[in-house]
Image: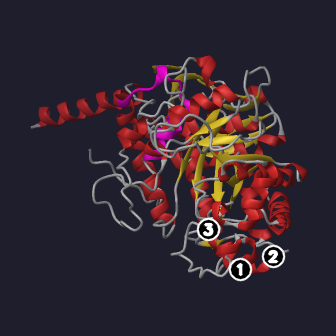
Amino acid sequence: MKNKFLNVALFLLLMIPCCIYAQDNLSALIPMPNKVTSDSDMVLVLENQVNCYIETDSLEFELNTLSSIFNKRFGINVKRSTESSKSVVQLLIDKSLKTKEHYQLSVNEKRLVIKGATSAAVFYGLMTLDQILAGDICATKQKTIASVEIDDCPRFDYRALMLDPARNFLPIDDIKFYIDQMVKYKFNVLQLHLTDDHGWSIWIESHPSLAGARFYTKKDIQELVDYAAMRHVQVIPEVDMPGHTVFLLSKYPNLACIHQRQTEKIIGKTGHMMLCAGNEEVYAVMDDIIGEVAKMFKSPLIHLGGDEADIPKNWAQCDLCRTLMEKRKYTKPSQLMIPFFENILGSVRKYGKKPILWLELNNVYPPADDYLFLYPQDVTLVNWREGMTPTGLDFSAKKGHNVIMAPSEYTYFDYPQYKGELPEYNNWGMPITTLERAYKLDPGYGRPLEAQKHIWGVMGPLWGEAIIDINRATYMTYPRAFALAEAGWTQMDNRGWESFKKRVLPNITELMKTGVSVRVPNG
């Protein structure tokens, strides 16, 4: 019996170094960095208090982030130091790095160093460090970090998610919570779809009657924008037009086409109404709105919709619109999009912003042979229609428009994740978008690199008809946003489904531990 206990004790002693050295510190990395070298035979051993050197006060938030990570993973305190040589951890700005989000992370037996071209890049290095520790449970219990060298920068600069508080309002604190999750996976843009047929979720001082039952004040927006900026996220507002405007038209019926002005507008049921292209009052009101929204948001970009306009039921039947067609010598009502957006984009430029629109082709189903109308050159387009995005990508390359890739069959997170998923509200036959399907997205669709230069990045929209609260929002977002994060950050040569599957589970666990509602994959 004595020998048996000795054998058990010997086994446990042997297991301790195994736990320290036989580590898998890459097992939770999402998105996968583009260059990683790991050496688990060498470790950095941490004391109960760690000194961290930052060379500039602009990294104060990153220092606090490091402190939170070390406290969570190790129970260790971090103290700022003014002497780099005596600091176990260093957070540095290195302007020689090639792009603004380029970072390098180095761990050896003496020191942990994260260098970034900007504070945002250093922050992304910290997000990678946190995932290294999440995948290295044995090491964190021993207060060690295995040696690793990472040299990483994103494939695309623009990596976005989208929330839709126009349909179901989300309080500011809930959106902050959403931002807290998305930055873990290096998303850097949050688009807010603020207006639609169902509601208007932002206060406009010059037109107060537009505000719905719940809305964001200017103070709310300022608070949110500042919170996001600290975490290197820009918040882009979307004010949808000329369609998706029933709520606006219920307040200002004279902005509708003449034959639609007296039509009953039932919020949540009435659809397919548009702002009148031939009514000058429309442009005056929209100038007020764009001016106020432009002041509230720091982002240089503003999204103006431009999608799903039911032109045959509106402009084609309106006397004012037909008069404008005759004046412009147009042969198709869809050409009225040209003067409509000439006016709207004039306001956008006047207030110092750059426009984004949803990309629409001249047919909503294949085949299509051109844009719906001639987009001005300074418009960035979101390429989204299922099955049509390769065509849209070709046109945008040919015509010289920057494009954001959001092909609905891969990136629309309101689509069900499996058959029969609830709630089924507004399920008009959406395709099932599994995690594996989401992962198959290549934003460049295999085109030569020269034909991908105009691609800004990716976006995952979450339309809000069935998103009743933040729990539902995160449940529909994760884990599919993991796939989008990797599509936006990681080069195709460094991606792989089998590797990704293994890296998903630790991140699912991490989110659940922090109270995030997620859909656990079961196949």
Q: Where, quadrant-wise, is the C terminus in this rendering?
A: top left
Magenta span dominant secondary structure: helix
Q: At 61% from the left edge and 58% from the top edge, which residue is drawn?
A: 311
Q: Please tell me in which quadrant of the rendered image residue 466 appears.
A: bottom left
Position of residue 110 in the picture relative to residue 518 (left or right): right
Q: At 12% from the left edge and 34% from the top edge, which residue is drawn?
A: 4
Instruction: Give the labeled residue for mark 3.
Output: 273
Count neighbours of disc 1 (C-alpha within 10 A) and say few if under 14, some if 14 to 19, many if 20 or more: some
* Foreground label between 3 and 1: 3
Q: At 71% from the left edge and 43% from the top edge, which residue is drawn?
A: 63
Gap between marks 1 and 2 measured at Cα: 10 Å
Instruction: Give the labeled residue for mark 2.
Output: 207
The kind of residue on which mark 2 rests is His
Q: Could you tell me if the residues under marks 1 and 2 are in contact, i.e. CB atoms within 8 Å? A: yes
Q: Is residue 488 magenta?
A: yes
List x then y, in percent, for residue 497: 37, 30
List x then y, in percent, for residue 41: 44, 19
Does residue 513 appear in this view? no
Q: How is the image coloured?
A: secondary structure
Q: Closest to the observer: 109 or 426?
A: 426
Q: Please tell me in which quadrant of the rendered image residue 60 appears.
A: top right
Part of the protein shown in magenta = 480-497
Instruction: Give the labeled residue for mark 1.
Output: 251
The kind of residue on which mark 3 rests is Met
Q: Could you tell me if the residues under marks 3 and 1 are in contact, i.e. CB atoms within 8 Å? A: no
